[in-house]
Amino acid sequence: MAGEWHDVGAIDAVSEDMPLAAKVGEREIGIYTIAGKLYAIEDVCPHAYALLSQGFMDGEEVECPLHGAKFHVPSGKCTKEPGGRDLKSYPVKAEGGRVYLKID
Ligand code: FES
């Protein structure tokens, strides 16, 4: 599994307002598109347990639906507490109408 590209869904399933919640093994990863570019970041908020892909988009940031922590999607940086830490980012690409994620 390490270092491989995983097909996680159709590109049509990702929109600016609605990220795609992907699962590879035990890892939950949110796939976002912003200004035509794809990003993949950890989906579970480090503060407690909420899926950020179910949160609210605010420009390049996503707001956690539970307590309002914010994360900058392109970098994974926590920009508003109580997020607690930055999120891990993953390489992501689109090919043939599908989204692929690389897990290290
Ligand atoms: S679970 Fe995300 S801010 Fe609390």
Image (spheres, grey):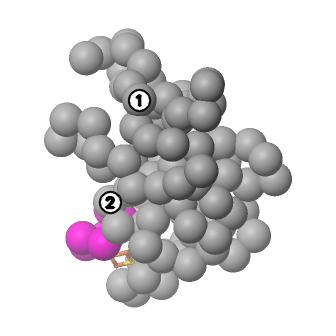
Q: Which residue is mark 2?
A: 44
x%, y% of residue 31?
52, 49
Query: What stretch of residues is rendered in magenta?
Result: 45-50
| Mark 2 closeness class: few <14, some 14–19, many ≥20 residues within 10 Å | some
* Residue 61 picture quarter: bottom right
x%, y% of residue 76?
55, 50
Q: Residue furthest left?
A: 26
Q: Which residue is mark 1?
A: 7
- Secondary structure category for the residue under label 1: strand
Above or below 100: residue 36:
below
Residue 11 in the magenta stretch? The answer is: no
Q: Amino acid at mark 2?
A: Val
Q: How many discs mark residues in the rendered view?
A: 2
x%, y% of residue 12?
59, 50
State the quadrant of the C terminus.
Answer: top left
Could you tell which of marks 1 and 2 lies nearer the N-terminus? 1
| Mark 1 closeness class: few <14, some 14–19, many ≥20 residues within 10 Å | some
Front in this rendered view, residue 72 or 82: 72
Front in this rendered view, residue 78 or 6: 6
Query: Which is the main secondary structure of the residues drawn in magenta?
Result: loop
- Secondary structure category for the residue under label 2: loop
Q: Amino acid at mark 1?
A: Asp
On the question of residue 3 being in view, the answer is yes
State the quadrant of the N terminus.
Answer: top left
On the question of residue 86 being in view, the answer is no
Tell me if the residue at label 2 has its CB under 8 Å from ligand 1. no
Residue in the image at 73% along x and 54% along y? 34
Residue in the image at 37% along x and 14% along y? 4
* Residue 49 picture quarter: bottom left
Above or below 30: residue 65:
below
Above or below 63: residue 96:
above
Residue in the image at 74% along x and 43% along y? 37
